[in-house]
Image (cartoon, grey):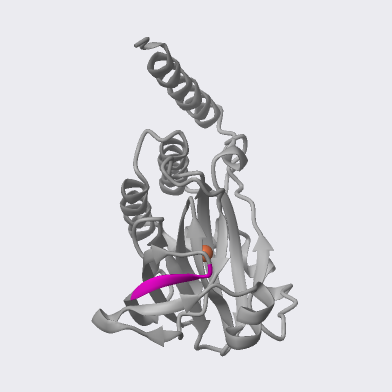
Amino acid sequence: MSQEPNRRDFLSSLTALALIESLSSHNLFGADVSPMLTDWYKQLYQISRDVADHKTKDLEFQSALEGLYARVNLEDLLKTLDFDKLSKQVDYPAKGAKSLTVDFKVGGLPTNLVFGRQVFAMTKGRSVVPHGHNNMATGFIVLKGDFRGRHYDRVEDHKDHYIVKPTIDRTFKPGEFSTVSDHKDNVHWFTAESETGFIFNVHVNNTDPTNQNGPGRVYVDPMGEKLSGGLIKAPKVSYGRVNQLYG
Ligand SMILES: [Fe+2]
């Protein structure tokens, strides 16, 4: 078999890295991003690129993203997201969470092609409603406020329901994080326990070449029928229904 695709991948990685290096050396990343955070973004870009190109597995991306979240300087991240301004302009929904579009002041990085990002904002008792993910890897890090965060492994995927197993159920404070992939902690559900709460999210699509489904959210009700072995039958539901139940 020809080695050409691998060589091409290698060359495209080199081109991407050269581009980043070039931007960095020309100081186009913006004066308000610290060198530490610039390096952090470069690594975020690279791990996202690698999993999107199927050079790494989604589980490897998950662990790399957790490593990055663990090392982030939260204050710098808030500054880069222009959080003070962002958090003062939120039109909070009566149910559920508001998704706010955010961009990085890291000029030139072609992040749109690799990973999506947003900030979820909500008031006390409101949630990022329970949902699983198809062919997508993602991670949350709490920016402000306290949350109850729940995760479930997707053990089986049926036409009208998942079989899930609870894996995480704890309080998340600023700087604390969790991640999702097809293979680990696939369903998540975050509820604000403070007056307001903000979560930063990064997601990469098409991370699992074995998954025939396109990337996307799958809304489920994880409070469904309890089965043996700690498993739960979680019916697939509409966004309207899950928002009504848990938003
Ligand atoms: Fe999600």
- Return the residue nearer the eye: 91 or 113: 113
Residue 220 drawn at (x, y percent): 52, 74
How many discs mark residues in the rendered view? 0
Q: Is residue 39 above or below residue 67?
A: above
Give the residue displayed 45% in from the left and 39% down from the top. 42
Closer to us: 211 or 22:
211
Magenta segment? 160-165
Q: Main secondary structure of the magenta part?
A: strand
Check the image and report above or below for 25 versus 192: above
Residue at image location 46% in from the left, 80% down from the top: 222
Say which of 84 and 213 sits in front: 213
Q: Residue at x 31, y 47 (%)?
A: 60
Q: Nearer the viewer, residue 124 or 37?
A: 124
Looking at the image, residue 247 lies above or below residue 47: below
Left or right of 24 in this view: 229? left
* Quadrant for the C terminus in the image: bottom right
Question: Looking at this rendering, what residue extends furthest in the front direction?
Answer: 159
Tell me residue 52's x, y (percent): 47, 39
> Image check: 26 left or right of 8?
right
The magenta stretch spans residue 164:
yes
What x and y, as percent, mark residue 124?
A: 58, 89
Tell me the quadrant of the picture where the N terminus can be found. Answer: top left
Q: Position of residue 86 (x, y in %)?
A: 67, 67
